[in-house]
Image (spheres, rainbow, N blue to C red):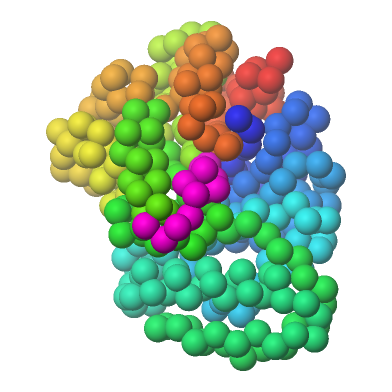
Amino acid sequence: MKIGMLFTGAETLEAIVQTGQAAEAAGFDSLWMVEAYRSAWVPLTALAAATSRVTLGPWVLNAYARSPFLTGLTALDFNALSNGRLELGLGGGNRQINEEWQGIAHTAVLSKITDQTRILRLMGEAPAGSLVEYTGKVHRMRWRAVHPPRPFPIFLAAIFPAMLKVAARIADGIAGGATLSTEFLRDRLQLEASQHADAVGRAPNTLRWKAVQFTAVHEDVAIARDAARAAVAGLFHPLPHPYYAWTLREQGFGTVVDALERDAGRKSSLAMIKQVPDELIDRCAVAGTPAMCRKRLEAYAPLLEELLMIDVLPAEHRPVGSSSLFALRA
């Protein structure tokens, strides 16, 4: 299993580049950028210029933020700049992000993702001079390619049942978010995706799986667990996120979600953190000593092509100017 590092965008651009360079030197396989607090492409371009080996990608681009045409052109340019190191994550966002942050109606999600995925694949594979034509339920295209093809894999943020069906049929792989336990991945999500792939004659083993995990590495287990606890509680404040509410409920933590949703905006962060039990952290995060965290990674290895880790350990507990994740590569 490959190991990647995911930046949330809360860091400065300088820190992102410095940490990314150190991660490549430490043996990490990939660097990824969340598109929320920063754009994805600008930090990724800085990382592409500062590294040479790691794969790079957005985790994940919002399908409502850009047209397939602009997304495709940017992806092609970035793939050329990075010498073919792009792997592209794509998702539909949610109603809060699309309507409250962007003022765009959150409609026709499955059709929009389907059309955009197919257009992006056509654009990536189109030989120079060839005509790309597509008509879908939401998007259409008539465009002539100018440059040589630069294909890139597309991973769809697809955990909800309907989107999982779409991804299993048309995407290169699944882009899983945080809070997915090994049991939920194996016994629920991968089983369902295999059935959807089979239904269209696709070999299930051609579906590539990546997922994210909140990770806190520290010799003091309590410090590591508290850091992961804070990250989980932070998913519910200030913006509700249906993805995490659903995944945690489906894994048996409905009462925890109820408490976090009830307390969001009403109680302090410390009070919300106390609502997250050790069992949830042990099953749905990676937290503890380096040895404990390596053991957790071993459990994911048979299930995933790659695990993307977010370092959630507070700065005061990390090595100065570094990441706690580097202890896993020591």
**For the point 34% across and 28% down, which residue is it?**
183
Q: Is residue 42 left or right of residue 192?
A: right
**The C terminus lies in quadrant:** top right
Q: Viewer-proximal residue, 158 or 122?
A: 122
**For the point 83% across and 52% down, which residue is it?**
49
Image height of 84 relative to 258, above or below: below
Q: Viewer-proximal residue, 121 or 17?
A: 121
Q: Is 18 part of what is drawn in magenta? A: no
Tally of numbered discs: 0
Q: Is 206 part of what is drawn in magenta? A: yes
The answer to whether any part of residue 103 appears in the image is no
Q: Is residue 167 left or right of residue 307?
A: left
Residue 85, image x, y percentages: 75, 52
Magenta residues, start to end:
199-210
Q: Residue furthest front?
A: 201
**For the point 60% across and 50% down, which residue is it?**
33
Q: Viewer-proximal residue, 215 or 177?
A: 177
Residue 216, image x, y percentages: 51, 23
State which quadrant residue 38 falls in.
bottom right
The answer to whether any part of residue 58 appears in the image is yes
Q: Residue furthest bottom?
A: 142
Residue 4, image x, y percentages: 63, 36
**The N terminus lies in quadrant:** top right
Image height of 111 relative to 95, above or below: below
Residue 131, image x, y percentages: 70, 88
State which quadrant residue 103 falls in.
bottom left
Q: Viewer-proximal residue, 199 or 176?
A: 199
